[in-house]
Image: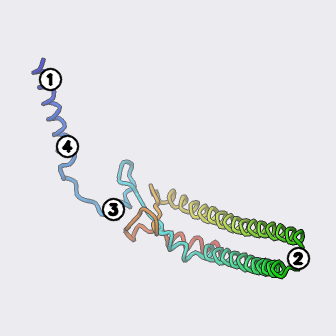
Amino acid sequence: MKNLSLILNIILLLAVAYLFADRFSGNEKPTTKKEVAENTAPGAALKIMYLNIDTLQANSKMFQKKKAELEKQQAAAEATMRKKLKAFQNEVLAFQKKQQSGTMTPKAAQNEGERLAQKEQNLSAQQERLAQELLQSTDEFNISFNGQVRDFLDSLKVANGYDYILIAGAGSQVLTANKDLDLTKQVLEHLNKKEE
């Protein structure tokens, strides 16, 4: 019984060694990155392209236009809030001077203090609301922009038989790539033509 187990283990070991040697014998010629990208036969190497998102955003007319609009909206909101906060600070200083000079009754001081506290809460709520609106506008644009890019990439993928289209740029997992596989220029031309 022990001999049978030993014989089976030896046969399995030989079979694995044969399969390993056959699979990794090195008889295949190495393929270049361009051949990998051009090979579309079933079971063949994957056809992988990439898009540089930083370049796309920096050169897309639509993206830059919306970015400028959002920055203008943010600057206007900040200016409005600065003006309101400055006016509020002036009211607080005037209240403090009246209190220190003793020209206010305790009841009037209490009422004015409560009014100022409520105004401060309202200003904070308004500041939060403006920030949320700006964030929502930014999110909505990003979803729309990414959708347009994705739709065009899907059409390129189908038309050219790409298996994957990766995103390259700051924060992406693609550290380096062959420039021949870059679709950024094609996508930029499409988006900028739509914007005209």
Residue type marked 2: Met
Residue behind mark 3: 35
Which one is in front, 64 or 153? 64
| Circles 3 and 4: CB atoms closer than 8 Å | no
Select label 2 or label 4 by which is in front: 2
Q: Earlier in the sequence, mark 3 or mark 1?
A: 1
Select label 3 or label 1 by which is in front: 1
Residue at point 69% right, 79% down?
75
x and y percent of residue 77 in the render?
Answer: 73, 75
Question: Is residue 155 depicted above or below 188 in this figure?
Answer: above
Question: Is residue 93 depicted above or below 31 in this figure?
Answer: below
| SS label for mark 1 | helix
Which one is in front, 18 or 126? 126
Residue type marked 3: Glu
Residue behind mark 2: 104
Residue behind mark 1: 5
Residue behind mark 4: 20
Q: Earlier in the sequence, mark 1 or mark 2?
A: 1
